[in-house]
Amino acid sequence: MTIVLIVGVSLLLSALMMLAWAVQRRFGNAGWVDVVWSFALGLAGVIYALVPAPAIAWPGPRQILVAALVAIWSARLGFHLLQRTRNGPEDVRYAAFRRQWGAGFERRLFWFLQIQAAAAALLAISMLLAARNPRPLGMMDAAALAVLGAAIAGEAVADAQMRRFRAVPANRGKVCDTGLWRLSRHPNYFFEWLGWVAYPLFAIGSGSAVAWLAFSGPAFMYWLLVHVSGIPPLEERMLHSRGEAYRAYQARTRAFLPLPVSRKA
């Protein structure tokens, strides 16, 4: 039954990313892809959390808690991206793809979005395992709640700080290095990753070795953000547009973990 559920949710994610492709084509802005992806992954997580599970009286407290937290995370990120996409230019990553792929952009983007659907399907497994721990709520759940709450709040603060910085005309062309951005070049990515750490905390302690697969979520998200589609293309773009100012920022600020850089005498 669980396999059928996973296959069904994975097919749903594939269909929703087809919809994302159609939406971005209609508006001529591939940034809409990220909006749909955020809401789609949230929907997958809520479905996984609330579908009745063996050995759990439905709906269990942990199922409700995980579903609520997934919905809050998805709504905050999705509406933030919605506002940014509706009021701004195309995301630099997709703009670069548009230039590189030329006439083949739409065709290649379609299949790229199916890869994103597969990535979402893998990430959602952590949510499934988090909700299906049959044991009563305990200290690990409290820790998971604190971690996810801090992650959602931290990402919201980082996004708000960047919006305020960009809203000042005098800051055009400058590097934001205030608030959380003084401690990390990508605090929004750090807190996005931190939120995924909560799901293994919900899952472990279930008595099942399968629960440890929930760590695949934060591990995969870290790889994506730090080594693939997050930091590398954005850093390249910032170096191109900000030049030496961004190089100086790199020298004094960590890329990911929001901690001061140690200074040697």
Image: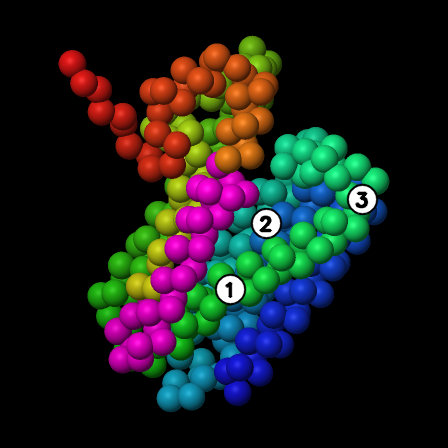
What secondary structure prevails in the magenta region?
A: helix
User: Which secondary structure lies at badge 1?
Assistant: helix
Whether residue 87 can be seen here: no
Q: Which mark is residue 122?
A: 1
- Of labels 1 and 2, earlier in sequence is 2
* Residue 249, x across and y down, in percent: 41, 19
Write the start and end of the magenta stretch as one range. Answer: 202-231
Note whether 12 is above or below 169 in the view shown: below
* Residue 223, x across and y down, in percent: 44, 49
Residue drawn at x 41%, y 72% is: 129
Which residue position holds label 2? 78
> Which amino acid, mark 2?
Gly
> Which amino acid, mark 3?
Gly
Quarter-wise, where is residue 210 in the image? bottom left
Whether residue 252 can be seen here: yes
> Which amino acid, mark 1?
Leu
Indicate left or right for 15 with 262 as reference.
right
User: Which secondary structure lies at badge 3?
Assistant: helix
Which residue position holds label 3? 104
- Mark 2 is surrounded, within 10 Å at the Cα level, by few (under 14), some (14 to 19) or many (20 or more) other residues, namely many
Q: Nearer the viewer, mark 3 or mark 1?
A: 3
